[in-house]
Image: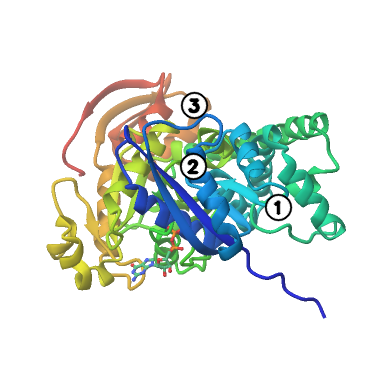
Amino acid sequence: MPTRQPTERAYLVGAELKRRREGFSVQDSLAELGQLVRTAGADVVGQSIQKMDRVNPATFIGRGKLDEIVALRPELAFDLLVFDEELHPNQQREIEDAFGPQDIKVLDRTALILDIFAQHARTKEGALQVELAQYEYRLPRLTRMWTHLARQAGGAAARGGTGGVGLRGPGERQLELDRREIRTRIAHLKREIEDVRTHRREYRRKRRKEGIAVVAIVGYTNAGKSTLLNTLCGSDVLAENKLFATLDPTTRRVKLPSGSEVLFTDTVGFIQKLPTELVAAFRATLEEIAEADVLLHVLDITHPNMREQERAVQETLEQIGAGGKPMVVALNKADKSLAIAESIKSPWVVREGGPENDSGAVRISALTGAGIGDLLKRVEEVLGENLVDMAVRVPFDANDLVALFHQRGIVEREEYTEKGTLIQGKIAARLVPQFAGYELTRRQTNSPG
Ligand SMILES: Nc1nc2c(ncn2[C@@H]2O[C@H](COP(=O)(O)OP(=O)(O)OP(=O)(O)O)[C@@H](O)[C@H]2O)c(=O)[nH]1
Ligand SMILES: [Mg+2]
């Protein structure tokens, strides 16, 4: 009978730098790291925080602190040492060496996230992107730990077994490949991902031509994005109380209150300290967000770090060039929030009902469906808000544009002239670029009819 590997034990390390950037406190960040560790399948057996002026270039934390942690090992019997910040490959090596001849896996936040991604990728696109990110991360880190542990995992790993936290995914194959081969593999992956991007771009072009608006659901991991998509369209996208439950984008058609249909996409959640290389590797997926018409930002108002999460999402959006997009904010988990309204003293939580404030945030429960009607109205407003009065002359060889105006806009006058079809009416500003070159007049309007 196959025996299950015992659950790996992890010890967490956080650093409190004097010149700390804004956002999560070290404690909150470590708590989140603990959740990542558990999602990856290991237990947390202890943690240390070191206050320091600057990073030690050799071992990241101070030598004395590291020795303290080494001394704790016999008692706590941890297999993993997980740092909340990205480690330089040399630091990782030095830390491993500090444990002498005993094996220890030294991971950082990035490696952990990649590990979870490797477990959760379901589609070819997701798998390709994770593999690329993992090779790029591991290439400069072919340390004793990797080589030794991969050898230990040996045949089992080669047959598809797991090397435990931090070694899942392509890492198991890594030993058989030298650096040069890895580089070849990276180049190959990049080409394949480029194909995915081209395909997605083509698909988006088609959608745009048909005038179908796209709403991208964005938000911190575990905010409730997939639950919301499920409630919106009665689907059953995997929604779990796990970090990064979703990796691959899912797109569904949803009817707005006015009857028009739009597409909602649910995709990978964000997290603080997401390294740029990881964001870059996920470009094909993230472009879906960057090219959406409207972003629907789902916030978990019951999370004590809601504000910090909101900011982390905003920063990532800026990083992928989606910072200035029109946005609707959904204040999610309202069903749970009243009970804890007092404890977190959030201004979002204490007021009841409908649109919440000037920014137009809407309180909802993705789980019970409360507030979803209001939310969709708000989405519709933002999507169609900026109707413009426009007159165009469409040549006969571009008749699909005439059809588009009829399908998506309000045609007030139509005439056939020698040079093409003359149309005057109202249409959503987001569709205007499609008529480039054929426009006669245009002005902003405030009334929808
Ligand atoms: N009480 C309550 N729980 C919710 C609500 N929405 C989502 N949840 C729970 O929150 C957890 C995360 O939900 P998901 O929909 O998987 O979150 P997500 O944003 O898709 O997360 P990732 O895919 O991991 O980024 C699940 O356990 C959901 O049941 C809500 O409105 N109320
Ligand atoms: Mg999800």
Residue visible at 21% across and 44% down in the picture: 448
Q: Is residue 335 visible?
A: yes
Nearest to the observer: residue 162 or residue 226? 162
State whether residue 443 is above or below residue 3.
Answer: above
Q: Residue furthest bottom?
A: 1
Question: Is the C-beta of the residue carrying label 3 under 8 Å from the nearest atom of ligand 2?
Answer: no
Q: Residues within 10 Å of mark 1 (few under 14, many from 20)?
A: few
Residue at mark 3 to residue at mark 1: CA–CA distance: 77 Å
Residue at mark 2 to residue at mark 1: CA–CA distance: 19 Å
Give the number of the mark in front: 3 or 1. Answer: 1
Q: Which residue lies under the disc numbered 2?
A: 64
**Quadrant of residue 32 in the image?**
bottom left
State whether residue 97 is above or below residue 179.
Answer: below
Give the number of the mark in front: 2 or 3. Answer: 2
In the rendering, at what x and y percent does residue 169 appear?
A: 71, 51
Nearest to the observer: residue 174 or residue 353? 174
The amino acid type, in three-letter code, at marker 2 is Gly
In the rendering, at what x and y percent does residue 393 appear?
A: 38, 23
**Quadrant of residue 343 in the image?**
bottom left
Q: Is residue 42 visible?
A: no
The amino acid type, in three-letter code, at marker 3 is Phe
In the rendering, at what x and y percent does residue 101 appear?
A: 73, 49
- Pointer 2 with pointer 1, Cβ within 8 A: no
Q: Which mark is residue 396?
A: 3
Question: Is the C-beta of the residue carrying label 2 under 8 Å from the nearest atom of ligand 1?
Answer: no
Judged left or right of residue 167, residue 41 is left
In the rendering, at what x and y percent does residue 180 appear?
A: 81, 29
Residue visible at 13% across and 46% down in the picture: 358
Quarter of the image with the C terminus in it: top left
Q: Which mark is residue 62?
A: none
Residue visible at 32% across and 35% down in the picture: 18
Q: Which mark is residue 102?
A: 1
